[in-house]
Amino acid sequence: PDGLVSRSEMAVLMCRMAGEESSLSASAFSDVADNHWAKEFIDSAVVKGWLLGYEDGTFRPDQKITRAEAMTIVNRVLERTPDKDHLLEDMIEWPDNMNKDAWYYAAVQEATNSHDYRRKPNGHEYWTAIKESPDWAALER
């Protein structure tokens, strides 16, 4: 339970949680061989828009996934679409997530703030109220 998760393992996890075993190969990354154990899951997750490759055309299937990447993927699977310009001032903010121009800024805020929202016509969330955070320690007990 304390181990790190690779990008290919995350693709498999998300597909299986969504009830999908695999799909036809529809994408090609220079570093994912046709016989890679998770290729069909990677392709399925990419086709659904849950995971993306890197600008250099790679997927980096064995690279450990970052917290920011994991939060972004879970948000995408749950169709949570934050808009960094429509968050609320009373939200929880994190010292390592203060750069509003960082690609992961809105995804981290989405994943770490309980909130009400309205969906805008473009599909993004317009936050309307911050909810009280759950008592995580009590839930763990």
Image: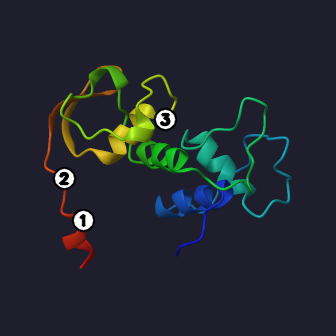
Nearest the eye: 36 or 67: 67
Nearest the eye: 130 or 121: 130
Dot 2 falls on a residue whose secondary structure is loop
Q: Where does the image place residue 115, in percent across and percent down from the top left?
A: 20, 41
Q: Where does the image place residue 20, in percent across and percent down from the top left?
A: 55, 59
Farthest residue in the bottom direction? 141
Asked whether disc 1 touches disc 2, contact meaning CB atoms under 8 Å apart, the reply is: yes
Residue that mark 2 sits on: 133
Q: Where does the image place residue 85, in percent across and percent down from the top left?
A: 32, 20
| Kind of residue at badge 3 | Tyr
Task: Identify the mark nearer the N-term, 3 or 2.
Answer: 3
Figure check: 97 above or below 67: above
Q: Residue at x 24, y 65 (%)?
A: 136
Q: Residue at x 55, y 42 (%)?
A: 48
Figure check: 21 above or below 70: below
Farthest residue in the front direction? 95
Task: Identify the mark nearer the N-term, 1 or 3.
Answer: 3
Judged left or right of residue 11, residue 132 is: left
Residue 104 is tagged as 3
